[in-house]
Amino acid sequence: MKPARTKTPRKLPVKKGSQTSLKDPVGVYCRVRPLSIPDQECCIEVISSTTVQLHTPEGYRLNRNGDYKETQYSFKQVFGTHTTQKELFDVVANPLVEDLIHGKNGLLFTYGVTGSGKTHTMTGSPGEGGLLPRCLDMIFNSVGSLQAKRYVFKSNDRNSMDIQCEVDALLERQKREATPNPKTPSSKRQVDPEFADMINVQEFCKAQDVDEDSVYGVFVSYIEIYNNYIYDLLEEALFDPIKPKPPQSKLLREDKNHNMYVAGCTEVEVKSTEEAFEVFWRGQKKRRIANTHLNRESSRSHSVFNIKLVQAPLDADGDNVLQEKEQIIISQLSLVDLAGSERTNRTKAEGNRLREAGNINQSLMTLRTCMEVLRENQMYGTNKMVPYRDSKLTHLFKNYFDGEGKVRLIVCVNPKAEDYEESLQVMRFAEVTQEVEVARPVDKVICGLTPGRRYRHQARGGAVGDEPLVSEVVLQSFPPLPSCEILDVNDEQTLPRLIEALEKRHRLRQMMADEFSKQAIAFKALLQEFDNAVLNKENYIQGKLSEKEKVISGQKLEIEQLEKKNKTLEYKMEVLEKTAAIYEEDQRALQQRLEAQGQRLQRQLSDKRRLEARLQGMVTETSMKWEKECERRVAAKQLEMQNKLWVKDEKLKQLKAIVTEPKSDKPERPSRERDREKVTPRSASPPPVPGDVFKTRGGGQSVQFTDIETVKQESPTGRKRRSSTAAPTQPDGTESEWTDVETRCSVAVEMRAGSQLGPGYQHHAQPKRKKP
């Protein structure tokens, strides 16, 4: 059977000694600055060396209802108002410099409200140098005599270092010294009186266990993050009085070791504390500061001063630097002076100051968010993404929080009551930050060469005066003389033994003289060979130098030609840009005209379509109307022709009846009464059928007569012709009777036709002919 399903147990905190042994918490320190006015109300009190307490000011209790409790916050160490810069340096920055010299990275922040003393803590004041000049002094006290010659180490654009041989370094030094304004050597440099008191550190401080079998190089760089853009404060831009160019922002990149760095940042090699601080002071003058309601010289940007220490071992002889790039150890110490968080209703900021304050607060809020996410991931085992990329400040130093070095944070607070709310937020941020743990950096292994290589050729014995003379060594190598005392006159052995010893010494001396002469000749030959080798080397170096000079001169000429070509191309580009601008304007104008023409054509096409549709409707309506009218007219004409044929048939029948009627010898003159009484019998023949007379084609538009000859015979001309032959005019009025009958028939036919056509047909009766 399957076991019962239970809830997932809560993840227990990691025990110390398993993984936490490889991690160190972020060191958070607190420094309280003294009040500017002695009798001013204070809201922060130092309880012990690790605890501070915040008191709610009286104004907040009166303005807001509620019970305010005194809040205490703990730090790794708290520095009161009487703490000196030396005491702060020994506790906070000294271990970071020790790690720097031993190849480990370090990051030091100063964080707090505007006007809380962050810049004073980092830089210092005349007569009391801050952390930065003291770090530089300790570095050069430790490795000053072990530094490599200038330009042996050369920085590249990939956040790493290259090693140059002595010849290339010498050539570059000569090239730099040949400039119109050569740099004064650091030993003879005149210290600027503006900052001379800041770097005049009375206490001598030096790192322990410095590797003497390595050479060192110190490089410094200085940047600022202003409105979330990175600017190089050491960049020497060419001044153009006609068209000054604003400083260009730099980009963040990632090197092959996944470390973030500022691409194209200026790195200056320095050889002394004075030279390094002079470089810092030159960049400090370019830093953006402004006068606000709370601080006369308020920093409007985050400044980052990087000290990069390059270490390379000596070769097996201890004379030159080992030309292996893989053996270089680069460590870096970043000193960050954060801009102060501020509220606009207190600083009365407007315009650019308001925008700067918004960007400062946004970057500090991103830093706080990163700390909260890191703490949550470490405490609860989650894997939330840390928003490093939301700000350039956090993106630049994300490697430190991922385990690339120690992190230290100095929280600077101003105890005055007006800063109570801002100080409360700073304390909460410090409380979150000191719960974040950073992985401990791993020690970097240096090549396994024999230690003590640097001093191998130096004497390790006593003083030079205690060494034995050469003559004494030679005399000690001779055989000892026998006793020369003669006690008896007849002694014949002492003198011969003495003569024999002296002869042996003479022969030994002669042999030593011959050997010495041979060795002297050999030594002279060696000296000659050495002189020849030195001469050949000098000639070789001179040849190399001349070749390099020729190459340099050729490169200068090529650079000049390229500059001229570049200027020509820039001029051509300007002309082409102007021409392109003109063409673009013409193109826009033509495009607008084309669009207008297209719109007009579209309107014309739409009007044409509407007109065609309208005309089509009118044509259809007119054609239907005319079709109906033609049908009506054809029907009317058809009926009219049928009636005419019927009338003619009737007339023909009557005429036939009249013609065939027998005539009396004496015809009587008919009277009106007789005519009225006399009824003429009508023919019983049916009316003519329209279908027998007409045929309609194509809807009744064309008419065809079936019996055209009959119609022609019954035409009035034919009738008159026939009537004139068949019924000649009689004197007794026979013609008059015919006419009267014809008229009556016509009237009857027309009346009948009008009754069949309806009310639309108007009957016009023909007037009766008057009798003669």
Image: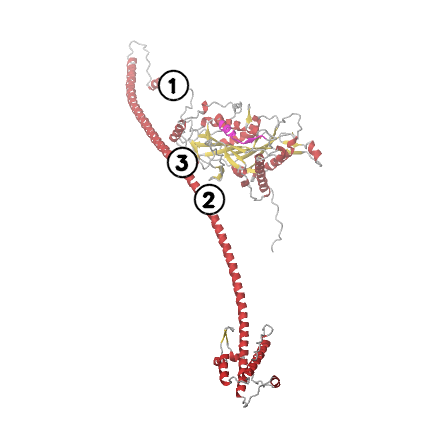
Element under label 3?
helix
User: Which residue has dot 3 on it?
Assistant: 567
What kind of residue is marked 2?
Glu
Residue 336 vertical placement versus 474 (above, below): below
Q: Earlier in the sequence, mark 1 or mark 2?
A: 1
**Residue 209 % position (x, y):** 49, 29
Residue 447 visible within the image: no
**Res 575 quadrant in image:** top left
Residue sticking out furthest to the top: 489
**Residue 762 % position (x, y):** 59, 73
Residues rendered magenta in the picture: 278-291
Give the alpha-carbon distance from disc 1 to disc 3, as whole Å: 75 Å
**Res 675 quadrant in image:** bottom right
Q: Nearer the viewer, mark 2 or mark 3?
A: 2
Point 53% across, 61% down: residue: 614
Q: Which mark is residue 585?
A: 2
